[in-house]
Each structure stands twice: as C-alpha cells, then as structure tokens.
Image (cartoon, helix red, strand yellow):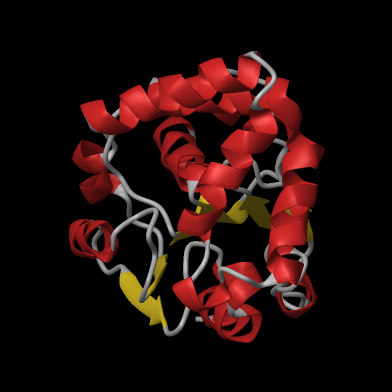
Amino acid sequence: MDNTMPILLVPGLICSPRIFAPVIPALWRCGPVTIANHVRDDNMGAIARRILAEAPPRFALAGHSMGGYIAFEIMRQAPERVAKLALMSTQARADTPEATARRRGMIERARSGQYRSVVDELFPGFVHPSRQGDANLRQIVDDMSEDVGAEAFVRQQNAVLSRPDSRPSMAWIKCPTLVLTSDTDNTVPNSLSDEMANGIPGARLVVLANCGHLPQLEQPQACAAALVEWLRN
C-alpha cells in the first residue's frame, strides 16, 4: 500500500523554491513535493486561496517564515485539507508597530529602486552570526531575491503587514504539528516558537543548533531529518 502524503512547501519572504532545494531529496521519499507560488497576491487571504486552488486535495503543509503566516491562513480557510503542519522559523503574532514601520520603509525603498539595498540590509538577520561571511549562502539569498523581484517583494510585504494575529486560532489546530526553530534566529525570536508549541495542542518543538533563520540552507541535514520525522510519525 502506498502511504505517501503529498507535501506542500511554502517559502518565506524574498525566498523562492531554492530555499527548499537542500531538503527536497529527503522529503521526496515521503511523498510528492510541491512548492507553492506565494508572490502573486498582496494579501494573505488571496495568497492562501490561490495556493489551495492549486494544491492536492489533502496534504502535509510546511511554511517557512512568511510561509508560516500563509500556513496559518490556509488552516483558517481549509483545515480539513491539512493532514500535518510544520511551522518553520515563523510566529503566530501580527507585527509590532516598530516592525510595521520598518516594513513600510522597505516597501518605499523597493519602489524607489533600492530593492538590492533592502536585501543587503536583511541578510545579516537571516543567517547565524558565524555565517555572515558565507559567500555561498549570500549568493543563494541574492539569487532568490532576483527570482522574486521588487514588485513581488512589495506585494509580499503588504500581505505580511495586513495579516491577522494567529494566536487565537492556534487552539483549533488538531493535526500533528512541528514547530521548527533555531538557536540563533535573529529574525524571529525563539520565544515566539515556544509560544506556538505551547499553544497548539500536541505540537512538537525542535531547535536546531548553530543555525539562523534559514535552516534549510544553514543546517540542511538536521532540518531534513526533523521534517522527515514529522512526516513519518
């Protein structure tokens, strides 16, 4: 009997399918893998609806960073279609006023032709401090930012700005859930992963060592192992 489950992966802000490339071979053994297109709309509801329209009838859902915000919206719209949920380097809260102001500033800069400088500004918060000078990681992030482009980046930021607080809906999540974080995520603090793991019934928390906000790229073997365990158990 074929017990494989379709797997739907949702990338983060300015991330393209390249973000999941290091872990896809391991996940593929557990089921067919699809990477969602999350660059076409400027609000969470529309992004989730379009992804659901293109997704298998039932699937395991993993969202990274902004992809986690989208995963929460998918859970609100169609919880019956999600067999398993993984929330990676993300949070359930809406933005603080400070984060909102920063995002609006990045939107204006991207619109005025400064998209590359925005990516330059974001990179230090994406990776573990020991990887700041990692030219390979930096190239992948630069390539992904080019894949996405300035116009889609603005749409993504507007969607993130308008997202709801997902904390009230965490208790409604009944499927097996993995909360994956890193010991040095300078974009989303560990305390917010703890909050999700404590708020979602039966959720399992995994903390990857020597890793920043991009576990698929920084610690691909440990990240893949955590995801495979989530899929198989």
15 or 174: nearer the viewer? 15
* x then y, percent, for residue 215: 55, 70
* Residue 63 drawn at (x, y percent): 53, 52
Q: Is residue 82 visible?
A: yes
The answer to which image quadrant residue 174 occupies is bottom left
Kindly tell me whether residue 44 is visible in this rendering. no
113 vs 155, nearest the viewer: 113
Q: Position of residue 152 (x, y in %)?
A: 69, 25
Q: Residue at x 47, y 69 (%)?
A: 212
Q: Is residue 209 above or below residue 157?
A: below
Front-most of 54 and 92? 92
Q: Is residue 66 left or right of residue 163?
A: right
- Judged left or right of residue 83, residue 101 is left
Q: Which quadrant of the figure has residue 73? A: top left
Query: Which residue shows up at 21% across the image and 62% down it?
Result: 191
Q: Residue drawn at (29%, 59%), measured in percent from left and top? A: 189
Task: From the top left corner, tell me how far across and down residue 168 is, in percent.
Answer: 19, 38
Which residue sits at x=50%, y=57%? Answer: 124
**On the rendered image, what quadrant is the N terminus found in?**
bottom right
In the picture shown, does residue 145 fall above or below 191?
above
